[in-house]
Amino acid sequence: MALKVAVVGATGNVGRELLNIMDERDFPADEVFAVASRRSKGRELSYGDTTLKCHAIDDFDFSKVDVVLMSAGGDTSREWAEKIGKTGAIVIDNSSAWRMDPDVPLVVPEVNGADVLNYGKKNIIANPNCSTAQLVMALKPIHDAVGIKRAVVSTYQSVSGSGKSGMDELWNQTKGIFVNDTPEPQEYPRQIAFNAIPMIGSFRDDGFTDEEAKMWNETHKMIDPDIKLTVTCVRVPVFVSHSETVNLELNGAMTPEEAREVLRNFDGVQVVDNPDEDQYITPVEAAGEWATYVSRVRTDPTVEHGLAMWVVSDNLRKGAALNAIQIAEELVKRGIVKPDTVNA
């Protein structure tokens, strides 16, 4: 199989990861186009053994491609996604712009892959927030088994979630501290090196942040609106991979052993959990991997049918680029896009 694919935002962290993962997974694209803003026009990017020259988004003819993997930020997505969809290409968008649009499916393929069939109203499929993606991977098999009444989640989100600027800020502040010359915060409201910042995004009137609201809204859309969910999002001085503590109140009894079993049997989840041998996953170990990892599954005795666990995933992969490519693979698997019927 072979398809024509455009990667919009190809010069960013997620855009480069999209190109890397397409190559790693042998995605059936016979032609790939790198697209970004006009200032990146002509810039060279690696794709496997080949080199791509970047096109400017406002000059590019999207009618010649089947699928557009878009990771250029919410403003660009709001300006361009519907226009691109009207050319016949299917847009898989990584920003927050379309996630809660009732005419746009929000998809994690292992969780609700069949929802890609609902792409047709706007030719747009949304990728969830990076923290939501790994959360629903851990919640879905447990919810299917016994049902989840309530979830309390705290995230420990890496600086790569803010893009290259966040990673640069952590690096520069860390170096500066050792020479008594710490740069002033630019990307974050407080120093990020050797610190933890208990807010991501913007504060809402209810005291939560919009990042926290994304997590419960998106989980409700993809799994079940009846799950009660409260979230605290924290930025931590980690370069790659987001971590989450998840405390669940279930509708029925489930032992940790039963939870580990249903999680192990769920595609895309790996359980690394053996306290006797100090086996658990950290963000460093998850970086560069495809799976969502679950560790420290245990009973929460403070509520009836309580369960607690630790969830870690590479936010640039399952939280963004990998999930987008899996959505594209789902479109191929279901026959929605075919190599011999471009934009038919």
Image (cartoon, grey):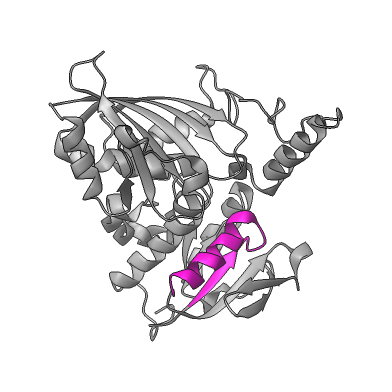
Against 207, residue 81 (above or below) is below
Q: Position of residue 192 (x, y in %)?
A: 68, 30
Residue at 30% in and 54% down: 110
Residue at 39% in and 32% down: 216
Q: Position of residue 148 (x, y in %)?
A: 23, 30
> Looking at the image, which residue sits at the far front?
277
Q: Nearer the viewer, residue 242 or 205?
A: 242
**Which of the 4 image quadrants contains residue 294?**
top left
Q: Nearer the viewer, residue 244 or 174?
A: 174
Where does the C terminus fall, quadrant-wise?
bottom left
253 part of magenta stretch: no
9 part of magenta stretch: yes
**Which of the 4 image quadrants contains residue 193?**
top right
Q: Nearer the viewer, residue 297 or 329?
A: 297
Residue at 18% in and 35% down: 257
Q: Position of residue 17 (x, y in %)?
A: 56, 60
Where does the N terminus fall, quadrant-wise?
bottom left
Residue 92 relative to residue 250: left or right: right
Residue 297 relative to residue 21: left or right: left
Number of numbered discs on residues: 0
Q: Nearer the viewer, residue 292 or 333?
A: 292
Q: Is residue 206 visible?
A: yes
> Looking at the image, which residue sits at the far top?
302
Q: Is residue 314 visible?
A: no
User: Residues in magenta?
Assistant: 4-26
Against 10, residue 171 (above or below) is above
> Looking at the image, which residue sits at the far left?
253
Q: Position of residue 271 (x, y in %)?
A: 30, 44
Against 135, residue 343 (above or below) is below
Residue at 69% in and 49% down: 164
